[in-house]
Image (cartoon, rainbow, N blue to C red):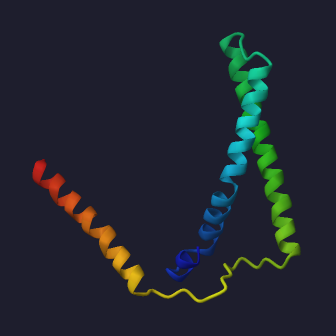
Amino acid sequence: MKGLEQLRVPLVLIMILSFMYRYIFVLTDDIMRMKQARDSRNFGGSRMWQLKTLGNMIGTLFVRSYERGERVYSAMLARGYDGQTKTLRKLRLNTADFTFGIMLCIPLVLLGVWINLVH
């Protein structure tokens, strides 16, 4: 996230990506628990009943996620969060990073050339 900040990506987008990465696993766990609860209550019935149940689950998940987000944000503000990504050391582009970037780009360029030659 610090690298995106140094690339001048808007802070709001960086915050959204950071929270998404942190809480996607929590959200997935909530979905799995809700699915298990639904299945344990025999999810059969008509198609309309199943759609109604699914809609209720999505609504509940949205409300839970929204409330969790409010609690987390309040806790972060209480601990001095100011929207900046903090690291212990300053990030710099070094030789290993440059080499990795080049080694990543070479196969992509070769793949692009190969695709253009085949078609």
- Return the x and y of residue 116 as percentages of the image width and height: 15, 54
Residue toward you, 49 or 80: 80
28 lies above or below 94: above
Q: Quadrant of residue 53?
A: top right
- Return the x and y of residue 11 as percentages of the image width and height: 62, 74
| Direction from residue 23 to residue 96 in the image, left or right | left
42 lies above or below 56: above
| Direction from residue 87 to residue 8 in the image, left or right | left
Can you name the residue that lies furthest to the top here?
Answer: 46
Q: Quadrant of residue 62?
A: top right
| Direction from residue 81 to residue 85 in the image, left or right | left
Q: In which quarter of the image is residue 49?
A: top right
| Direction from residue 102 to residue 55 in the image, left or right | right
Query: Which residue is at a point 72% across and 30% down the rendered structure image?
Result: 35
Query: Which residue is at a point 43% across and 87% down the rendered structure image?
Result: 94
95 lies above or below 111: below
- Return the x and y of residue 118 as percentages of the image width and height: 12, 49
Query: Which residue is at a point 33% across and 68% down the rendered structure image?
Result: 104
